[in-house]
Amino acid sequence: MSTLGQNMVKMRVDRRMKQKDLQEKSGLSQRYLSALEHDKVDPRLSIVRRIAEALGVSVCALIEGQPHA
């Protein structure tokens, strides 16, 4: 089972997005996004929603690692 951070990276890379792109779309700092991608922090659900929206996926897809949901 993959982690939220691993799913974020995979989905971001699949969409040819850099962390900077995700930062701009989500409004979160690159430092925080990096910490999330390395599973160093546990985000609130509101943060997961912002990231999912920026990536164009559902919260469930982001958490479960389903790229096409």
Image: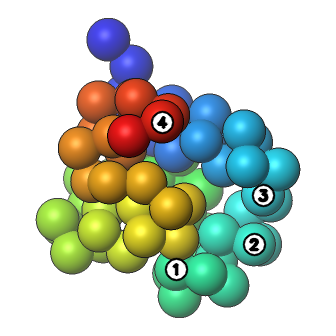
Residue identifier under label 2? 21
Q: CA distance from mark 2 to mark 3?
A: 6 Å
Q: Nearer the viewer, mark 4 or mark 2?
A: 4
**In front here: 69 or 47?**
69
Question: Which numbered dot is residue 60?
Answer: none
Q: Tell me the amino acid under the disc marked 1.
A: Ser
Question: Which numbered dot is residue 68?
Answer: 4
The secondary element bearing badge 4 is classed as loop
Residue identifier under label 1? 26
Q: Tell me the amino acid under the disc marked 4.
A: His
Q: Mark 2: give few (<14), some (14-19) or many (20+) Cα within 10 Å.
A: some
The secondary element bearing badge 3 is classed as loop
Tag 2–tag 3 contact (CB < 8 Å): yes
Lower sequence index among marks 2 and 1: 2
Q: Tell me the amino acid under the disc marked 2.
A: Asp
Locate the C terminus and report the quarter of the image it occupies: top left
**In front here: 13 or 32?**
13
Residue identifier under label 3? 17
Tag 4–tag 2 contact (CB < 8 Å): no
The secondary element bearing badge 1 is classed as helix
Reply above or below: 47 against 14. below
Q: CA distance from mark 4 to mark 1?
A: 20 Å
Q: CA distance from mark 4 to mark 3?
A: 16 Å
Q: Nearer the viewer, mark 4 or mark 3?
A: 4
Q: Is residue 60 left or right of residue 66?
A: left
